[in-house]
Image (cartoon, grey):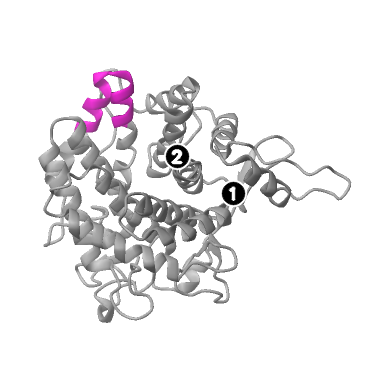
Amino acid sequence: MIIPSVALLLGAALTPLPATAAPAKAPADWSAAVVESTMRRHSPGSAGGWGYTTGLYMYGQYLVYQRTHDARYLTYIKNWADRFVGADGTIDQSFNNLDSMESGNVLLLLAKETGQARYRVAAQKIRTRLNTYPRTKDGGWWHSTSDSRQGQLWGDGAFMVNPFVIRYGQQFGDASWGNDESAKQIQVYASHLLRTTGTSAGLLYHAYDEPGGLTASWVKPSLGNTNGISWCRAIGWFGMATIDVLEQLPANHPRRAALVDIIRTLVPAYARWQDPASGRWWQVVDKPNASGNWTETSCSSMYTFTISRAVERGYVDASYKDVARKGYQGVLARISQGSDGLTNLTNISEGTNVDDSLGYYYGRGRKTNDFHGLGAFLIMNEQLIRTESR
């Protein structure tokens, strides 16, 4: 759990109160408080459809279950998934975009926890779909098969499919495919999206379009057919995906060193663009203090997690632990507990398409308790609870 003294120090700052009221204490366990609040706000039947945002949240809740062993948390996840998975493993999804595959991670954890074949059968549908799923010429899976997104790679997509791919392979005897494919995808995406020059080197552009703008108006050919903008959450998705693949990838895998090098490129870039005042990161990462720009909570959680895990695994120097700690405090400043006892996590960017306009990214809605932010917060908080309590 969070170190008690830190929680007490944060409490008054996180929950503004009238001068006559006694300062509220922060929960001793923010992860459990978020999960309890979410389960009170949403039944499994109303917690969102089959999609990556709910899947991200459910995976975060599962991490809390693994630590607390509160059976209610796992039951909630199972009841949500059972809305979509039949008793025989049927699942009414075509899997024609990577976003729809992210919740496959929930299928994998339920297959492990329950032993029920239905979840493996449902997960196999994603695995089979990937056999024929379209790719760029160098093998990257398109973000979507829809007419307007053919041939595109988005930083987001690295997380939507690759952690599932390598976990599926390890869990169901398909490790050679899972290891090779997930590592390859990370490298292919990096080859098109990673910025290599100037002070923004180490960040990623949001998206790449292989056709060169035949259907996408945002393409900048002079910037490698990317959109030319480093949106914070896309880079966060990519960082977490790379970490998750490395968690499973064998030590002797031929692509492992290249993936570690990617992390060693990302982390210094994250550190360089951290807002020194808040500890968080900007919606458009390399435009600090630009008019309309703002520090965003979900990506700040993602960067904090990625940096902390990279330090823990020895991918980067231990000095970056201070960057993660500062990011952690910055995110904690965005969470509070209301008088109703429910938590509120603020300034989470709503779902975001690809654009070439800075104003589009600055203008995205700033949501409270959006699953993008709640899921990222839980993943980050479980990592920091573990590493900061040592």
Please provide percent x and percent y for residue 364: 52, 61
Start and end of the magenta stretch? 107-124
Q: Residue 193 lies in what quarter of the image? A: bottom left
Question: In the picture shown, does residue 97 fall above or below 234?
Answer: above
Name the residue type under label 2: Tyr
Q: Residue 249 lies in what quarter of the image? A: top left
Q: Secondary structure at mark 2?
A: helix
Front residue (pair 361, 68): 68
Front residue (pair 199, 214): 199
Question: In the picture shown, does residue 217 fall above or below 242?
Answer: below
Tell me, for residue 368, which label it has, or none.
1
Residue at x 49%, y 27% (from the top left corner): 68
Calculate the distance from the C-alpha at mark 1 to the C-alpha at mark 2.
14 Å
| Residue at the farthest right position | 20
Residue at numbered disc 2:
57
The earlier-in-sequence mark between 1 and 2 is: 2
Residue at x 74%, y 38% (from the top left corner): 339
